[in-house]
Image (cartoon, rainbow, N blue to C red):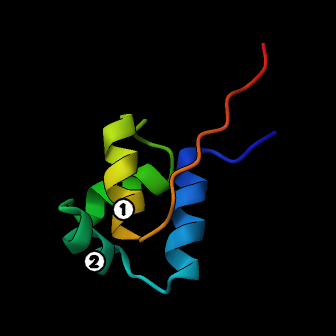
Amino acid sequence: MSDTWGKKIRKLRNEKKETLQSLGEKAGMSKHYLSCLERDIHMPKISTVERVINALEHDLKIERRKS
């Protein structure tokens, strides 16, 4: 089973040694909202994921599940 968006975002943030506060400032989001994303309380829109990924200076790769 693959990781959720929240787990992927948290992993990337930790690898970049970013705090929720600093990432929020770069992505234009509150640290509370980012925390909720990382804990999978909110399901982000693709545009939100793109903003976070861009703020982390990472390439966005979307894997499609085979049905």
What residue did someone put label 2 on?
21
Does residue 35 appear anywhere in the picture?
A: no
Location of residue 5 in the rendering, given as x and y in whole percent from the top left corner: 55, 47
Q: Quadrant of residue 29?
A: bottom left
Q: Secondary structure at mark 1?
A: helix
At label 1, which amino acid type do we have?
Answer: Asn
- Mark 2 or mark 1: whose residue is earlier in sequence: 2
Left/right of residue 41 with respect to residue 31 in the rendered view: right
Q: Is residue 65 above or below residue 67?
A: below
Task: Name the residue beneath numbered marker 1.
Answer: 54
* Residue 53 visible somewhere in the drawing: yes
Q: CA distance from mark 2 to mark 1?
A: 16 Å
Q: Residue at x 49, y 73 (%)?
A: 13
Question: Residue type at mark 2?
Answer: Gln
Q: Residues within 10 Å of mark 1 (few under 14, many from 20)?
A: some
Q: Is residue 55 above or below residue 63?
A: below
62 horizontally vs 51: left or right: right
